[in-house]
Image (spheres, helix red, strand yellow):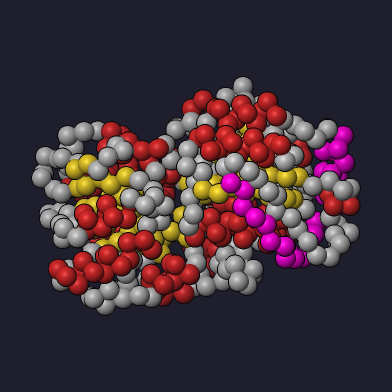
Amino acid sequence: MKKTNALKSAVALLLAGSMLAACGSTGSSSAAGSGSSSAATSEGSEPAAGDAAAANGDKYVIGIAEAQANDEVTIRRAYLENFIAPTYNVEFIFSEVLKDDAATKTFIENCINSGADAIIDMKSANGTMAQLCQDAGLVYTFNGNYVSSPELNSTDYTSLSGCIGANNEHVGSLFGDWLEENASEDGSEGFLISTSLASQGNTQHIEIAKALLEGLQEKYGLTFTKSIDELVASAETTNAENDKGILVTIYPGSPNKDTWLPGISTLLQSGKYQMFMSSGQTYNQTATVVDEVEKAFGMDIKVASIGALGTTLTTAFNTQDPNGNPSVDLVAVKTVSCMTACMFATTYNALVEGTESPAVRGEDNMPVYFTFNFIGITSPDQLAETTEWDNMETGSWIADKDFVDSMLVTVNPDITSADVNEIMQSLSFDKIVEMMAA
């Protein structure tokens, strides 16, 4: 790593004694495009006495490579800029939306030239990016898992701190249980599934899309002509032919692309689909066309999607469709601050102690897959309980200082990667209600 062992030890000892007690505000920071980069900076009062890194004039710089532009990204950036940066004396470089691996590579190169110490990769997650970071002495952390990036499950990448992704089995069960309760007995309503970036290798979208198809397969005893893996990997709109003749259509692509909404609108406007499910956050883009189709055909389209807490979700659950129901029926919510806190803690632990640290690697010295749970929201009343969860306006974060500190080696020198995973997998709706009330 770029920091010397002596410096790491000094920072660890000093930070272990005390961390910043308050979460101040930061100045604004500009996004770094795929061709250029600029660092987020924290401004304001001089550092508190417990801020050892600031006292030493040392500040870790971490690049954040993003694949999308939605509520999740907005919340993550606010959390990192407004809470993590001033509390732990770190600096962030934020990318624009990165369309492909070439853009990610350029962004990382710009971060290297800007003096970054680490990269958190939300886009590409592959050996090319890991090797680029390793050659430059940067810690590399990515969003995903080792199923879609098997080459990274190796100690050959000594700069790799690990990966953080959804507990996909748990996410799949949220959608599967919802399908079981809400889909008809004969499947005659028609199912439209947006697989988002699954065809481009996004692990979360792959696993959720697979869970949706497996849920339909189980509910109706379907046999698809093609394998579920083939269907999910399709980069073209595909009718998933099956032995029961149930209409299941796969629609891939990113809602950030100009062609996405017109394409899915055309499908919805056919009136053939009364179940619309998405492996990514799409309900905000499709709300208008869903409403128009429901009015035109006198039908109720049930909508299930991934999402994040915020204004968009609140609007969706408090906007009624022509049948008097919320415009969205299930949103599997990613607790963004918790996920981001785990990414930050893993990266920070690797910067302080090295990627060989027990807080980073497993007992077998292999890279670890850190997972987090989604929370299923199905009603405005349930959503109302989350008003202060990851609230950017009030600065009320689920992953507060106590939560982040619980995963840091500078506060808990004996913490292991298994401990971190236990903390993340303990999260549930009721658990978070309890945490926010404390």
Q: Is 264 displayed left or right of 222 in the figure?
A: right
**Residue sitting at 62 percent across and 64 percent down?**
397
Q: Nearer the viewer, residue 256 or 376?
A: 256
| Residues in magenta, as a range | 5-33
**In magenta segment, residue 11:** yes
Quadrant housing the N terminus: top right
- Evaluate whether residue 165 shows in this view: no
All told, the count of numbered labels is 0
**Residue sitting at 37 percent across and 52 percent down?**
258
Quadrant housing the C terminus: bottom right
Residue 381 occupies quadrant: bottom left
Residue 395 occupies quadrant: bottom right
Looking at the image, residue 112 lies above or below residue 44: above
Q: Is 379 displayed left or right of 293 in the figure?
A: right
**Residue sitting at 77 percent across and 50 percent down?**
411
**Residue sitting at 58 percent across and 46 percent down?**
33
**In magenta segment, residue 207:** no
Residue 175 in the image: state x and y as whole percent. 33, 53
- Evaluate whether residue 285 shows in this view: yes
Residue 37 in the image: state x and y as whole percent. 65, 45
